[in-house]
Image (tube, grey):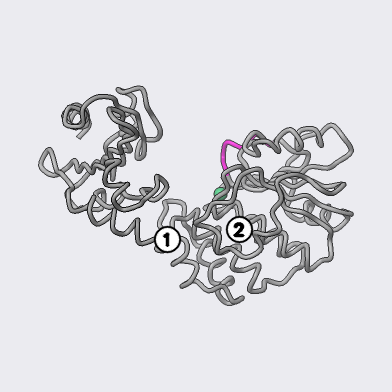
Amino acid sequence: MKERATIEQIAERIKRAKSVVIFTHMRPDGDALGCSLALSFALDRLGIEHVVCDESPLPSNLSFMRGLERIQKTVSIDADLYIALDSADSARLGALSETFERAMKKRIDTVNIDHHISNPHYAKMNYVRTCSANCMNVAKLIDALGVALDKEIAESLLAGLLTDSGNFSHDDVDEECFLLASRLVKAGADIRSLTYNLFKKQPKERASLHAEVMSKIRYFHDDKLAVITISLDAMARHHADNGMTEGFVDFPLNVDTVEVAASIMEVKQGQYKISLRSKTYADVNRVAGVYGGGGHVRAAGCMLFGELEEIIDKLSYTVSQYL
Ligand SMILES: [Mn+2]
């Protein structure tokens, strides 16, 4: 039942569909929304009835994306084709995974288009190709459907490509990324506004909290470890909420001498959430592991309990073992 399919075979199946449901993963990011909306715009051009479904509330930082209003929480049409995009397994669809799994047993065809190497080919037709962003796979599909790139499609695809390639900075960025970006810009995508919305825009509360936190970076071990602390008191004074500290830890990591950066965020009195990043060699997954946390070699986290200065001492000692 579970087959590999070519993009052309999937395009043919879509053209024969009476109606389609497009699914993407829970807590969607720019790539998930970008490739889903781009395919939705392409199906509009072909006059194919469809809906786009995602179980999660849409992230406020992506509210600038065009077409978000078409995303529904549940399947409202009787479709003969279900397409999952950017979802490494069907469980990633969250509450909608049951709907997708059930379709496999009914007479509804399922398609899985993804770029994660771990994807187990969970649909009837599967196109899994490792690349920077799933928008690169969906761009191929839109080409195979014979739909020309226009501004709406191009901006959706470029939002995804920028997001998952880390603004063209990750290891897997290759010639194909730039060739696609070039086509998307030619088709009318506004790279300046996309880059601003995805990577630079912030509320003033975040800017002032950022300034205070970064003015107090502490360095240890010949400036190879940098530590920032974010207290509940500072959050309250700047009227900031938790989501606003996203990305704070990258700032001390970019200091030229620093190999490991740690952000220590107060969750409640005596409890701190630690985020760790490393630049080139230190394994912060193992640092976090010492305290029951984990993650990846370059990015990991854990929870620590106690008094702040004791926590900094402990953490600093543990990090020194990996520097
Ligand atoms: Mn992705």
Q: Is residue 122 magenta?
A: no
Would you place residue 94 above or below residue 161 in this image? above
Asked if one can make out residue 286 in the rendered structure from this viewpoint, the answer is: no
Q: Residue at x 19, y 40 (%)?
A: 225
Asked if one can make out residue 9 in the rendered structure from this viewpoint, the answer is: yes
Mark linked to residue 199: 1
Mark 2 lies on residue:
34
10 Å neighbourhood of mark 1: few (<14), some, or many (≥20)? some
On the picture, is 38 further left or further right than 132?
right
Query: Residue 138: x percent and y percent?
Result: 66, 57
- Residue 301, by quadrant, is top left
Q: Residue at x 74, y 62 (%)?
A: 144
- Residue 35, by quadrant, is bottom right
Q: Residue at x 32, y 47 (%)?
A: 236
What amino acid type is highlighted by mark number 1? Phe
10 Å neighbourhood of mark 2: few (<14), some, or many (≥20)? many
Query: Residue 298: x percent and y percent?
Result: 34, 40
First of labels 1, 2 by sequence position: 2
Residue numbers of the magenta segment: 116-121
What amino acid type is highlighted by mark number 2? Gly
Characterize the magenta stretch by its predominant secondary structure: loop
Check disc 1 and report its element: helix, strand or loop: helix
- Residue 223, by quadrant, is top left
Q: Quadrant of the N terminus?
A: top right
